Amino acid sequence: LAVGLALGLMAGCDDGGGDSTPTADMATGGAGGMGGAGGGGDAGPDAQAGVGLLVVEPAELAFGQVAVGEGAEADLVLRNDGDGDLQVTAFEGLAAPFGASRMPPISVPAGASRTVVFTVQPEAAGALAQTVRLITDVPDAAPVEVPLSAQAVQPTGEPEADTLDFGTVEPGTPGGDFIRIQNTSEIATLRINAVVGVAAPFEVPDGQLPAEAPPGQSAQVLIQFNPDAEGEFMQAVTVSTNAGSFEITLQGRAITAGELSVQAVQPAWAPLDVEQRVVVFGGPFEAAPTAIMVGAVALQDLELLDAHRVAGNVPAGAQAPGGLVDVRVEIGGSFGVGPALFVRTPPVGQGQALDAAALAAGTVGPEGNPWTLAVDQIPAESELEIQPGTVILADAGAALAVDGTLRTPEGGVVVFAPAAPDAPWAGLRFADATPASSLNGLVVQGAGAEGAPCVTTAGTASFNRVQVHGCGGDGLRVAAGGTLVVLGGTFADVAGDAMALPTADSTVFRLQGTWVYGARWPVRALLQHFGGRPIGSGHLWWGNATDAIGVGGTVDGALTLSGQPEGVTYRVADPVAVAAGGTLSLALNAPFRLDAELAVAGTLSLPAGGGINADGGRIVIAEGGTLTARGTQADRVVLQARPDPEVPNPGGWGGVVIEPGGVLDVENATFRDGGLGGEGANLVINADFEPVRGCAFDDSARTGVVINGSGFLLNSTWLGNGAESVRVTGGSGRLTGVTADAANPALVFDPVELCADWEVPAFRLPDMSDAASNCPAE
């Protein structure tokens, strides 16, 4: 929109160069103002003076909603549409809270433009308006008027928590958590400007402030806790925002954990009037413990169960201290401490009910221990915080659906347990909610009634140091649309899989530092969940039916199976296949222990220096499928079945079978340990094939390679095979290579008439003499 007031002014000069006089009337154009500049005088009798025309865009500046204490900007373009220069000499009427980035005089040559940034910085809520009049140096020109407007709004907010508890860390090991201020206003942006009063061992890392949040969301600032000595630390800080200041308490604890790891306690609580047998997970435990302490109480009847478990009895007694306590294990001169891992409560029946009224309060804590679960749902858009040290007991078969948000802050365990030891409850069910639930130190024990999962998540709930003990089904199942986020966790005595992702529309985001004992699989999921990046490190999986990631499913797109940290492998838990048009590639360090048939109708691609380590399975390349395994002389592709890479394992798997119509795209690859059950070979080729060069066929229980198609197998080697190096059952082509196998003959044509269809110009023994075959002598 261009708004201007035009003045047409013709100036003439006499031949003496005297006074100029107007030669045309003034004209007003449009609804806006204008400015013109005269050309002046001594240019000669035929010269015409230039005329300036000021046009502004836009016609008005509307800043919209602006938070009090904040600022907003808007550009105003000053354009001279005339043929003479002009100068803006004043902004009349411009006053706070409005301002401009540059002030007059502002020269605007003919045909040029200048941009001025106007600003507003309101100091109080309300409607703001003023009109700025742009004055030019054009004689008799009317000012250009530009209306300015804004709606100043006052942000409002409140802390999500008055206390930020960092729990317990080891000295020298930093922890972190966020101060979050929720923006409760409907239209204004909330801004955290500063956190005042932060001192060691707490600190605010650089680069976070200011932090902003739109309405309905929370602005957050990371606080780090990094103590260099043991102790309990607490300090009050002030969070300064454009919605006011808020007082927040920071607290944390530092203890030395010791040489032994103390990960979890099963069960994680006991009433004061009951003797309780408990198992402590950690280690490595090399001998029976000399002491196990639950707070100040010594356990009795100590026992070493294995390298990662010790046990003892928590004695009953009203004089025993209650509350949330540390667990300490001592073996000789070594010790380990698990901070805030166990809860002593009053006797069952003396606690409160977690009912609708308690839920409406928004927070429950250990002062109501042991709570009895009397609701079956945390409704959508509602929130419940359960403080560390709280124990909640559920009746047989009960479940808690978390349709809203559940938080368990740092600082110790929160225990969900059955009301009666032999009456399992169902478990926790997390819906996809915003904000997502955040669980720290959550303990779920005795759940999984009738084989149900103990914990189900359909959203992005994060589990930090979660414990699932004595589960009748899967420990943690990710439902459709859910994301697996587990940072530290212990799963013990789980009847199903510790962590399961049975659907395609679920995700593995992060999995780190988990201990899994007594489960079917530590993790069981579809292959596609592991394309891209490793799950994370620090896992200890032992005493399970299979200590690996169990995979299954069909690959129908492009998938690269990712590498994993040391000690984590993939195994086949459910049928796996590559569909037509699909491609399964293995990352260089993808530890895939193939222990079932892998059917490939698409493409299986193995990188140079990589391969597959099988355990009883086999690979079948179907019609239309392709095996791509192109190594180099330095970095071969290896397909084998070896628990120990240096020890041959003849018959360890079924090898590779290329069916009619399948494609063998192989070079510098090694096929080993085939001949499962005394049948088959390292490689069976039932299709015509392009030249295959530089391959090795070693340690088959029967035959190195079986050929039933036409092609060229060149510059190959055979070593340690059982019956023969090569068996040819069809086709025609050419064979060259060296065999060290003792079989006589090393090369078998079946039927013998195939000898006439194959060239064997250089099939030799290591001494370069011809290897024996069953072909008749010429």
Image (spheres, rainbow, N blue to C red):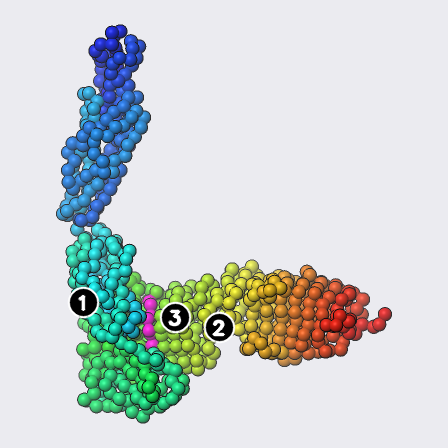
Measured from the top left, where is residue 757 in percent x and y? 78, 65
Work out whether mark 2 precedes mark 1 in sequence or the reverse, and give the earlier one: 1
The reply to whether residue 418 is in sight is no
Would you name the residue on which mark 2 appears?
569
Would you name the residue on which mark 1 appears?
235
Q: Quadrant of residue 291?
A: bottom left
Residue, x 40% and y 73% (percent of image)? 538
Q: Quadrant of the C terminus?
A: bottom right
Work out whether mark 2 precedes mark 3 in sequence or the reverse, and give the earlier one: 3
- Front-most of residues 611 and 756: 611
Q: In the rendered structure, are the residues bearing label 2 and label 3 in contact, judged by CB atoms less than 8 Å apart?
A: no
Judge left or right: residue 265 versus residue 690: left
Residue, x 16% and y 62% (percent of image)? 247
Would you name the residue on which mark 3 appears?
512
Q: Quadrant of residue 193?
A: bottom left
Q: Which residues are magenta?
A: 461-470
Callout 1 secondary element? strand
Q: Amino acid at mark 2?
A: Thr
Indicate yes or no whether the magenta region holds residue 465: yes
Q: Quadrant of residue 255?
A: bottom left
Work out whether mark 3 precedes mark 1 in sequence or the reverse, and give the earlier one: 1
Callout 2 secondary element? loop
Q: Amino acid at mark 1?
A: Gln
Judge left or right: residue 380 versus residue 565: left
Q: Amino acid at mark 3?
A: Gln
Q: Work out how far the residue at label 3 is from the one at label 1, CA to CA, in angstroms.
A: 31 Å
The mark closer to the camera, 3 or 1, is 1
Callout 3 secondary element? strand
Residue, x 41% and y 81% (percent of image)? 518
In the rendered image, the vertical position of residue 709 relative to residue 187, given as above or below: below
